[in-house]
Image (cartoon, grey):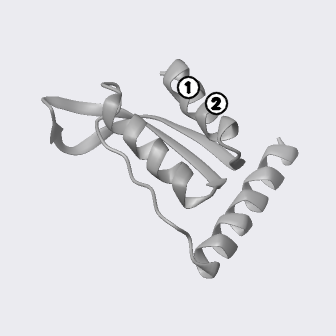
Amino acid sequence: MKEAVEKFKALLVEEGAEIINEENWGLKKLAYPIQKKSTGFYQLIEFNAEPSVIEKLEINFRRDERIIRFLTFRMDKYAAEYAAKRRSVKSTKKEEN
């Protein structure tokens, strides 16, 4: 799974995207079976990129057999504030440990 994530991160960087945050949520049970699979690895990558990069990324997601579902969306200012706040809380928890 790591090699798939690294492949897509490399594609983003190669196309000039800035990776802001990356989280590995691990193996999770799917809400319903997809392609006869009941579990899947979840990965979150937050990045800034031009719209043309998103199109290339989604084409590569569709071509990769390891990706069974994906979601890309543009964050509005409230979502960006929430994500920044969430990252700062997460980093302070890491520093305490």
Residue 19 on image: x %, y %: 70, 47
Structural crowding at the residue carrying mark 2, measured as other residues with C-alpha within 10 Å and reported as few (<14), some (14–19) or many (≥20): few
Seen in the image, is 25 located left or right of residue 90? left
Residue 17 on image: x %, y %: 68, 48
Tag on residue 87? none
- Image quarter where the C terminus lies is top right
Seen in the image, is 62 located left or right of residue 33? right
Label 2, on which residue?
Answer: 10
Residue 64 on image: x %, y %: 35, 27
Seen in the image, is 32 located left or right of residue 24? left
Q: Which quadrant of the figure has residue 83?
A: bottom right
- 17 versus 77 height, above or below: above
For the point 54% across and 46% down, which residue is it? 44
Q: Which quadrant of the figure has residue 30?
A: top left
Circle count: 2
Tag on residue 7? 1
Q: Nearer the viewer, residue 44 or 63?
A: 63
What amino acid is found at the position of numbered circle 1 in the picture? Lys
Structural crowding at the residue carrying mark 1, measured as other residues with C-alpha within 10 Å and reported as few (<14), some (14–19) or many (≥20): few
For the point 55% across and 49% down, which residue is it? 53
Contact (Cβ within 8 Å) of mark 2 with mark 1: yes
For the point 65% across and 42% down, which residue is it? 15
For the point 61% across and 34% down, which residue is it? 9
